[in-house]
Amino acid sequence: MGTYYTQGADKAAIIAECVLSCRAERHTVHGNHLWAIGQGEHNGKPHRYVILFLLSNQPGFGWGYKPISEDMGPAYYDCPLAYVKAVEEFEPLAYAAEWREKIYKINGQVRPS
């Protein structure tokens, strides 16, 4: 999956686009990491998940983003623990369980079983 750039876009416009695209319940920005709780469906039922948008600027062109949802096992761990706790009631998909475990550990807590 690549990075999607928009010619002439500033960082704020890209953040707004990302928030809208995942129907974010809440979001926060740490440097060029946009973390959000996205909303969608899984097996026909409502599903919430954590997603990271890596933001980047291509000088002379514009800002862009690379979406990495928790089920892809992002190699970034500065996600707010509150976001992971907010989605715990939803079954983690693919690599999400392992990633959630690491977020808890980094924050000195144990993930509930």
Image: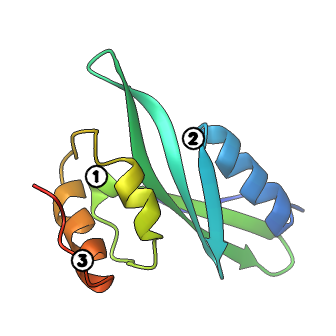
Q: Is residue 69 above or below residue 111?
A: above
Indicate left or right for 16 with 79 as reference.
right
Rendered residue at 66%/50% (across/down): 18
Closer to the chain start, of discs 3 and 1, is 1
Of the pair 94 and 83, the residue shown nearer to us: 83
**Residue at 87% across / 78% down in the picture?**
60
Q: Amino acid at mark 2?
A: Cys
Measured from the top left, where is residue 49 in percent x and y? 40, 46
Secondary element at image label 3: loop
Numbered label attached to residue 109: 3
Task: Specify the quadrant of the image occupied by residue 77.
Answer: bottom left
Q: Closest to the observer: 90 or 71?
A: 90
| Amino acid identity at mark 1 | Asp
Q: Residue at x 30, y 73 (%)?
A: 103
**Labelled disc at residue 22:** 2
Q: Is residue 11 left or right of residue 40?
A: right
Disc 3 marks which amino acid?
A: Gln
> Residue placed at 73% from the left, 76% from the top?
57
